[in-house]
Image (cartoon, rainbow, N blue to C red):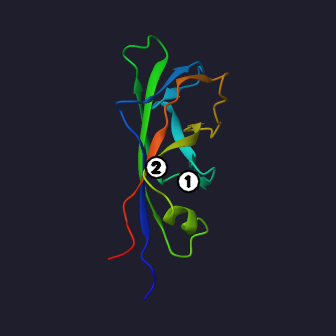
Amino acid sequence: MSEPNVLVNFRLDKDQPLRLRWLATDGVPGDGYKPQVTAIKLADGGRLVMDSSAILEQTAPDPGGGIGAYLMTFNGMVGYAADHADRARIEALTDQQVEYDLEFVHDDTGKIAVENTDYKIVERPRGWARKLTRRGP
């Protein structure tokens, strides 16, 4: 019998969103630029590369942040098969805070926004990883 997939939920909740200041003039998050979590960094130092469809990112203007201020959250469910290269690391995963790599990609041109030129991150809270599938009886 083959081992089942292990499901992991990666998220950054709305009660502690990433806060950023947008500086670029060729679009804004949600209208010209799409945020993309490209990797999750685990507490043990491991890095899990994310497919562009693995995590859903949401952006919205930050009503308390003034002009050019935005909030970002994300949520994603990723399945890891028994033969996945990172499966051993996933098996050892407990509910934990994680860091993440992030890009903003222009919808039309594919241009990747440059941090501290096109945008500045004001607050970057850690996200969470939660393994949903457990092994055993």
- Residue behind mark 1: 50
The extreme bottom residue here reads 1
- Work out whether 32 lies above or below 56: above
Picture layout, residue 47 above or below residue 107: below
Tag 2: amino acid: Ile
The residue depicted at 55 percent of the width and 53 percent of the height is 50
Which residue, given by chain and number where applicable, does mark 2 sit on? Answer: 55
| Side (left or right) of 60 relative to 53 | left
Q: Which amino acid does the dot numbered 1 rest on?
A: Met
Q: Circle 1 sits in a helix, a strand or a loop, which is it?
A: loop
Q: Secondary structure at mark 2?
A: strand
Q: Residues within 10 Å of mark 2 (few under 14, many from 20)?
A: many
- Residue 133 relative to residue 50: left or right: left
Whichever of labels 1 and 2 marks the residue nearer the N terminus, that label is: 1
Whole-percent x, y for residue 105 in the image = 58, 38
Instruction: Report the label total.
Output: 2
Identify whether 83 is placed above or below 21.
below
Q: Residue at the location (42% across, 76% down)?
A: 4
Instruction: State whether residue 130 is above or below residue 66.
Output: below
* The label number, if any, that marks residue 137 in the structure image: none
Q: Are marks 1 and 2 in contact (CB under 8 Å)?
A: yes
